[in-house]
Every structure is written in structure tokens, then in C-alpha cells.
Amino acid sequence: MIRRLLMTCAIVILGQAGMVSKANAQSIDVPFSGTVGGNCTFSDVTPGKLVVNRGTNATTLAAGYTGGVMGKVSVTCNRSSSITVSKPVQTSGPSFTPIMADGYVDSPVGRTSSTSSPLRISSIGRAIPLEVDMKVDKGSTLAPGTYGFKTTLTVTPQ
């Protein structure tokens, strides 16, 4: 009798083990996404040198006159971009309010000024050399002294 009871218990236990569901492996994909925005960097900045206009009445300073030196900078972008240049702002020297002030940018792909439309560049991943000029006109003779000005270049990825 005990033998029969043990045998019955064994059959019941083995039967239960067979009914237990087996583990199934499952897989799922986890998606990722990201956005790379436009990016530009300036490098290799070389300051310019201003000189006065030649003549008896020195009223204007510019880098583009004989003896002056254009400022230089390179820009590298990862997508098409546009460049603007500000009007010159005086940073040192005898102060005056110019009757005319303009900044200019020349590049292998075109030219712009602080009074014209932005310059579009599309050379992606390559450094583009820029030459920067500026011109200020006092309208009357400039006082002796050392003058400092700056223009601001802004590059905007499209």
C-alpha cells in the first residue's frame, strides 16, 4: 500500500512538472534617434591694420587702403551657412561719431558687407578663408592718435 501511495505521488509530481510552462526567450528592439545640428567654428584669426586715406584731409580709416592689412579668419561648417559682418565699433583712440561706417567680408565664394545681404557658403567640412575689411569716415580731419575698431562676424547654419 505504501508502495502504491509512493508510486501515485511520484506520478502526480512528474505530471505536475510536465505541465509547468517552459521559459521562452524573447527579443525586442530599442530604437534610438538623435539630431546633429548645424555647427560652424572660426579659427586662425589675424588682426587687420588700419591706415588713413591719403591726401591733405585724412578723414577715413580703412584696412583696404595702400599700406593697410585686411583682417583674416577661417570658418568651417558642417552644413550650408550664411555669414554677416557688423559695422565697425570703436574700441580705443580719440573718440568720434563716424558719418559712415561699414564692415566687409571677402571669400572665395563671394562678398558681403554690413549693409548688404548675408553671404551664403556651402563648402561643408572645409575651412573657408575670409578677408575682413572695415571703413569709417569721420567727415572731418581725424585727430592724431592710435585708433582701435572691431567688426563682428556671425555665421549661422541654415
Image: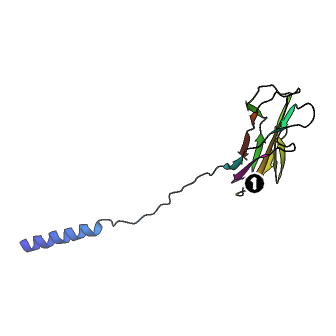
Please indicate, yes or no, whether residue 93 appears anywhere in the rendered image: yes
Q: Is residue 51 left or right of residue 27?
A: right
Residue of label 1: 128
Query: Whole-percent x and y of residue 110?
Result: 84, 50
* Residue type, numbered disc 1: Ile
Query: Whole-percent x and y of residue 31?
Result: 53, 56
Q: Residue at x 77, y 37 (%)?
A: 86
Question: What segment is highlighted magenta in the picture?
Answer: 62-80
> What is the crowding at mark 1: few (fewer than 14 residues within 10 Å), some, or many (at least 20)?
some
Q: Is residue 114 magenta?
A: no
Residue situated in front as seen by the camera: 106 or 133: 133
Q: Secondary structure at mark 1?
A: strand
Residue situated in front as seen by the camera: 75 or 63: 63
22 above or below 124?
A: below
The image quarter in which residue 3 lies: bottom left
144 above or below 105?
A: above
Q: Is residue 69 magenta?
A: yes
Q: Is residue 110 left or right of residue 129?
A: right
Residue situated in front as seen by the camera: 78 or 60: 60
Snapshot colouring: rainbow
Query: Whole-percent x and y of residue 83?
Result: 76, 45
